[in-house]
Image (cartoon, rainbow, N blue to C red):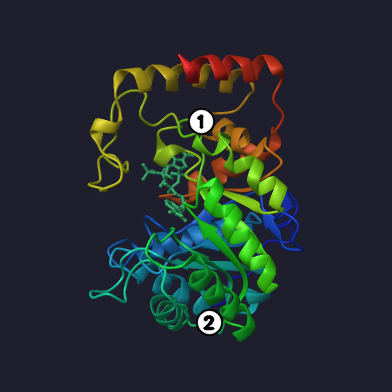
Amino acid sequence: MNFKASKNQYQNMIYNKSGNSGLKLPAISLGLWHNFGSVDNFDNAKAMLLQAFDLGITHFDLANNYGPNPGSAETTLRKVLKRELQSYRNELVISTKAGYGMWPGPYGDFGSKKYLVSSLDDSLKRLGLEYVDIFYHHRPDPNTPLEETMRTLDLFVRQGKALYVGISNYSANETKLASQILNDLGTPCLINQSSYSMFNRSIEDSLLNVCEQEGIGIMAFMPLQQGLLTDKYINGIPANSRAAGGSPFLNQNDINESKVNKIKALTAIAQNREQNLAQMAIAWVLRHKAVTSALIGASRPSQIIDNVKALSNLNFTEYELNNIENILTT
Ligand SMILES: NC(=O)c1ccc[n+]([C@@H]2O[C@H](COP(=O)([O-])OP(=O)(O)OC[C@H]3O[C@@H](n4cnc5c(N)ncnc54)[C@H](OP(=O)(O)O)[C@@H]3O)[C@@H](O)[C@H]2O)c1
């Protein structure tokens, strides 16, 4: 049965132009890193995708290796696209990436043309698509000339396999170099996908400025620091949380007393803004004009509904920002 989106689907979402490009991305995008693999509940994954789209989240972010098992998040999306969202392809921005280990041997990792070409072909098959809207190089490769990697991104656009290209986990300097090469090739870098949250502010050192100067948007991934920047860990570690679920990326040791104290203090500020902490954390990354979109994850549809409400209060007073700064820096 084909899904039918609500009439007011686009009413409450904000769409930001990505850098100097013509592509508008939703202020909140949904990533399929966790909870969309073959080991996860398909009906829940489908419900999250449909809920997100119905709230105007037009952008779904994937990578070749998202699962587990690697590749299976792309297969999950193919099933939902085919059964529910086929008629909405033109209203969706779908991205994938390659750059981390995907298959054994010397051609299944990093940034060679050999790896990237095979990987995107595999991703398109798993997704059941002729093209992705954005293809990212997932991480810099110290052993492949940057020209080779960027030429391959340019090739994908010329072949029509990707409409736009981006980079992820590139430093400020690497971003500058990549952007110059892509500009020379005539395929400007659309977006830089980087981790950014109240608990991880490294992009403030120089990447934010470089992206602004180069006309590149920023896709701020992990704005909730995998769920830490919500009210979920205030009273311990709930059984149905990522930290309790055996994720290799978040475990009980990441949640200590000093973090919880900060979470409590931040929650008090959020409450004064009539938001919960998750909503304030999303609004906080979006306060920079270089940030095009906050790339969230979710484990259930209700979290997506909750997080989109962040958009009803994106403004911060100087007083609030100073208080947040004090909490984060002490
Ligand atoms: N380019 C890269 O290298 C890279 C790396 C990492 C991620 N990413 C991208 O970023 C996306 C998001 O990453 P992430 O999932 O770590 O992001 P996140 O938004 O920081 O964390 C998402 C997790 O927080 C919890 N959560 C979300 N909303 C909540 C709410 N309202 N209340 C309570 N808990 C809430 C859920 O965890 P529970 O399971 O605990 O409920 C959810 O799975 C990924 O899917 C991927 O697309 C990219």
Identify whether 136 is placed above or below 304. Answer: below
In percent of the image, x 62 and y 57: which residue is there? 191
Q: Residues within 10 Å of mark 1 (few under 14, many from 20)?
A: some
Q: Is residue 238 left or right of residue 157?
A: left
Number of the label disc, if any, that sits on residue 129: 2
Q: Amino acid at mark 1?
A: Met
Q: Could you tell me which secondary element the residue under label 2 belongs to?
A: loop
In percent of the image, x 52 and y 29: which residue is there? 277
Q: CA distance from mark 1 to mark 2?
A: 36 Å
* Residue 9 rendering spot, x and y as whole percentages: 70, 58
Closer-to-camera residue (50/199)? 199
Residue 254 in sight = yes
Q: Could you tell me which secondary element the residue under label 1 belongs to?
A: loop
Closer-to-camera residue (96/148)? 148
Q: Amino acid at mark 2?
A: Leu
Q: Is residue 53 left or right of residue 263?
A: right
* Residue 105 rendering spot, x and y as whole percentages: 23, 75
Q: Nearer the viewer, mark 1 or mark 2?
A: 1
Number of the label disc, if any, that sits on residue 198: 1
Residue 13 in sight = no
